Image: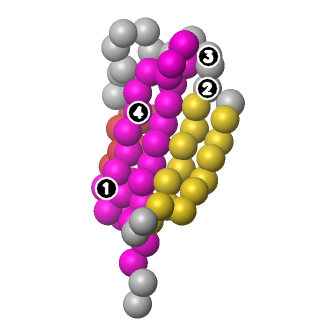
C-alpha cells in the first residue's frame, strides 16, 4: 500500500494505492465506496476510485482548502 498526502493549489490530495486483487473490470460502488463519496461531497471534495496499474485499486481524494 502506498499512501500520499500532498498540498495542491487550493487544496490537499490524499492518494491511496494498493497492489491487491482490485475490482476486475468493474468497480462496484457499494455502501463502502458510496459512503466515502457521499462524505466527500458533503465537504466539497472530489473522490475518484479507479483500477490501479498492474492490479489493485487507486483512491484519490481532492479536498479544497478555504482560507479565511
Marks 1 and 3, how far apart at CA = 27 Å
Q: Going from the N terminus, do you reach mark 1 or mark 4 first?
A: 1
Q: In the picture, residue 67 is in which quadrant?
A: bottom left
Q: Label 1 neighbourhood size at 10 Å, few (<14), some (14-19), many (20+)? A: few
Position above or below: 58 against 53? below
Magenta span covers which residues? 40-66
Q: Single out the mark in the foreground, 1 or 4.
A: 4
Q: Going from the N terminus, do you reach mark 4 or mark 2 first?
A: 2
Verify CB contact (< 8 Å) between mark 2 and mark 3: yes
Q: Going from the N terminus, do you reach mark 4 or mark 3 first?
A: 3
Q: Single out the mark in the foreground, 1 or 2.
A: 2
Percent across and percent down for residue 33 are 41, 35
Q: Going from the N terminus, do you reach mark 1 or mark 2 first?
A: 2
Q: Which mark is residue 49?
A: 4
The quarter in which the C terminus is drawn is bottom left
Secondary element at image label 2: loop
Position above or below: 24 against 44? above
Q: Which residue is drawn at 54% across and 62% down?
A: 7
Percent across and percent down for residue 66 are 39, 78
Percent across and percent down for residue 13 are 49, 54
Amino acid at each position: 500500500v502506498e499512501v500520499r498526502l500532498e498540498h495542491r493549489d487550493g487544496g490537499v490530495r490524499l492518494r491511496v494505492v494498493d497492489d491487491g486483487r482490485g475490482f476486475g473490470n468493474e468497480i462496484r460502488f457499494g455502501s463502502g465506496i458510496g459512503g466515502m463519496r457521499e462524505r466527500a461531497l458533503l465537504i466539497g471534495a472530489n473522490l475518484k476510485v479507479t483500477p490501479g496499474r498492474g492490479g489493485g485499486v487507486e483512491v484519490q481524494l481532492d479536498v479544497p482548502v478555504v482560507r479565511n
